[in-house]
Amino acid sequence: MRKYSVAAIVREALRYNAGWERAWRSPEPKKQYDAVIIGAGGHGLATAYYLGKNHGIKNVAIIEKGWLGGGNTGRNTTIIRSNYLQDSSAAIYEKARSLYETLSQELNYNVMFSPRGVMMLAQTEHEIRGYRRTAHANNLQGVETEFIDPKTVKKLCPIIELSGPRFPVLGALWQPRGGTARHDAVAWGYARACSDMGMDIIQKCEVTDILKSNGKVVGVETTKGVIKTHNLGIIVAGNSSILAEKAGFRLPIESVSLQALVSEPVKPCMDVVVMANTVHGYMSQSDKGEMVIGGGTDGFNNYTQRGSFHHIEETVRALIETFPIISRLKMLRQWGGVVDVTGDRSPIISKTPLEGCFINCGWGTGGFKAIPGSGWAMAETMANGSPSQLASAFSLDRFREGRFIDESVAAGVAH
Amino acid sequence: MLLINCPFCKERNETEFVYGGPVGVDRPDPNAVADQEWVDFLTLVPNPTGPVFEKWWHARGCGEWFVICRDTVTHEILESPDEKS
Ligand SMILES: Cc1cc2nc3c(=O)[nH]c(=O)nc-3n(C[C@H](O)[C@H](O)[C@H](O)COP(=O)(O)OP(=O)(O)OC[C@H]3O[C@@H](n4cnc5c(N)ncnc54)[C@H](O)[C@@H]3O)c2cc1C
Ligand SMILES: [Zn+2]
């Protein structure tokens, strides 16, 4: 792989950009791999990357039914934060956030991580108490957050309306090193690094069945034939229930469409991320100038990648209250992704009843921020055959044992 | 946006209804079944692509609870309560 650098830009400028090579290969699948990952979203690609980098397992295939990064990874609003309440969540999300800090250098690919700061508005007394508690918890966990007053909120985000008609802003939970990154670039950067290690990313290839023998996984059946392996990772977000059924077990997951939308581009007016859980909406400004707006999840399970229209109305109404200045903006695009939601709003990184088969899912409405940490923990789990320290709390057993990791408040708004 | 067929009010807008989740297995007697079966009842619901039976409540209408069969990929309502009974 040829490195991206300033020198490379100069060199290519001099020869009319004719020398750029493809970022990753598109090979035909081999008959057998040491490990196979189903799903080339951020989590699948990151898992493959750390399998190679941290554990030396490089004979790996990543199988993707569409195009890499075309699932939720390419559809999300890219908010990165780690201000969760429970210790096990803070640990894995903060691991991910800290890996994001140096990911561009590590992958030699600009993922445009922008730690511009994330604020979650408190608009009720209850929220004030909740966020103060989170700030205390975060300080104990080593996650830098603080509770700020309305004056500081206004200073950080001048376009905000503090005395909204229904829910005035009473303060906010502020994580200065939270922010955003470029979603496609995260998938592309990991893909390029995986390909460079000799891994095969096989796109437009759907896994149609999981092959087992004596309670162990032996391979997968795909639209490009059978691929053998004894180490399988299922990392398919909204499609997890479908793949689990093929592997012979069931998951405590429900799939539902989550929407987002972006406005026409405008001049820079907001250099932080603002989330408003009570009125339910959140917004940030992309480098292109578009206001990126996260909408709601549908009220019922589905796989449509579309979402009901009235959720857009509700989200936009909420945000106009918070930011009256956007009331005349035109919206450019709207889309949806199928997210995988668990009962306690926490992910699953786990062994499964099928030996050699591991699952990583349940990131629901907020897994983009977790990609590097999740890949790190999942790779360790697959390489050792047993849950890594970061992953152990997120095992499937927790639903039987009642060890829920309740993050329904931290995940209160869908992001 | 769904148009849902209430047995009393006929086709009404999705926003008038509250989703009651997919129809799972009947509640077992927790003392009579193995732990695993009880846990399954508490945590697992059907989550298929394609047709699924699910409960809806006409909360902002007549208040009736009923079951429809809806395709989770196309949103097509394959069976309304009228046709069922
Ligand atoms: C609108 C929206 C906004 C969001 N906003 C945020 C946010 O601001 N911050 C945040 O942290 N998170 C956010 N999320 C959540 C985040 O996008 C996801 O949690 C994360 O991207 C999941 O990544 P993944 O790799 O697990 O799944 P995906 O990126 O969905 O990848 C799974 C892949 O598996 C493939 N696949 C499925 N079935 C098969 C099969 N049978 N064979 C082969 N391949 C298969 C799919 O094609 C897909 O590419 C948002 C999600 C949505 C939809
Ligand atoms: Zn009715």
Image: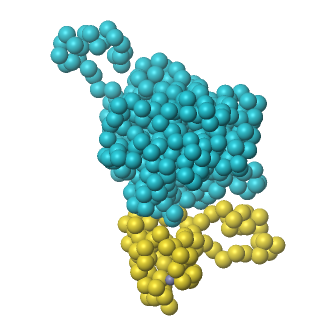
Chain colours: A cyan, B yellow
> Would residue A392 be visible to someone looking at this image?
no
Out of A121 and A205, give the one closest to the viewer.
Answer: A121
Out of A267 and A207, give the one closest to the viewer.
Answer: A267
Residue A110 image position (x, y, % from top left):
41, 23
Residue furthest to the left: A16
Would residue A195 be found to the left or right of residue A151 on screen? Answer: left
Residue A120 image position (x, y, % from top left):
59, 40
Q: Give above or below for A36 relative to A364.
A: above
Residue pictured at 58% horizontal, 34% vertical: A153
Residue pictured at 46% horizontal, 88% vertical: B82
Out of A144 and A56, give the one closest to the viewer.
Answer: A144
Residue furthest to the right: B31
Residue pictured at 52% horizontal, 33% vertical: A157
Residue A280 image position (x, y, % from top left):
54, 51
> Would residue A369 be visible to someone looking at this image?
yes
Residue A161 image position (x, y, % from top left):
52, 42
Q: Quadrant of the N terminus of chain B?
A: bottom left
